Image (cartoon, helix red, strand yellow):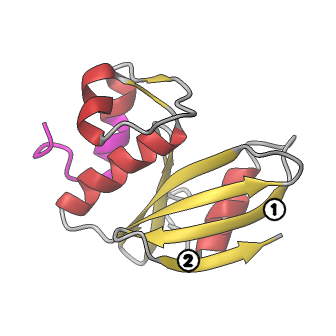
Amino acid sequence: MVEELDTPQKISDYLIENDFEYEVHAIYAPDPYTLWKTKRGDCNDFSTFGVFIAHWHGYETYLIKILYNGTFEKHWIAIYKEDDGFSFTDCQYYFNNYGYFFDTFRKIVEFDCKYFPDKKLKKYIVKDYENNIVEEGYK
């Protein structure tokens, strides 16, 4: 299965076509294999799955953790270096700025936050595949 999922778009399509469901995992984050077996996960789980598979295929990958004002809630998205920019997945859904790709992590965060108008961005943290912080941004 991993061999066939050789692009971020295919990873996203696989999650959608195979009915992976959103389920909050506040206490733990399953590894990619467990998510694949159970087909249930939250934004962190889906992002980790996408980054793991894309990295295996040689993609430069990142995870972004988004924090909001007035809540302890966090949101995670997976980032993929493609062509001349970045694409991302939010849970099962793939975004590439209508084929033009994003040129900064901040633009990705701002684009993604538009889907949550009731939440106000406080901070975001970008980590590379080895979990090193490569960028932090504030509202």
Residue type (three-letter) at the residue carrying disc 2: Asp
Magenta residues (range): 1-13
Q: Is residue 95 visible?
A: no
| Of callouts 2 and 1, the N-terminal one | 2
Point 53% across, 34% down: residue:
27
Label 2: which residue? 103
Label 1: which residue? 122
Point 29% across, 40% down: residue:
32
- Tell me: residue 47, above or below residue 93: below
Expressed as whole percent of the image width and height from the top left, the position of residue 21 reads 46, 21
Q: Residues within 10 Å of mark 2 (few under 14, many from 20)?
A: some
Between residue 46 and residue 28, name the one nearer to us: 28
- Tell me: residue 34, above or below residue 118: above
Q: Is residue 6 magenta?
A: yes
Tell me how far mark 2 sits from mark 1, CA to CA: 21 Å
Between residue 48 and residue 100, name the one nearer to us: 48
**Where is the N terminus found, in terms of image quarters?**
top left
Foreground: disc 2 or disc 1 = 1
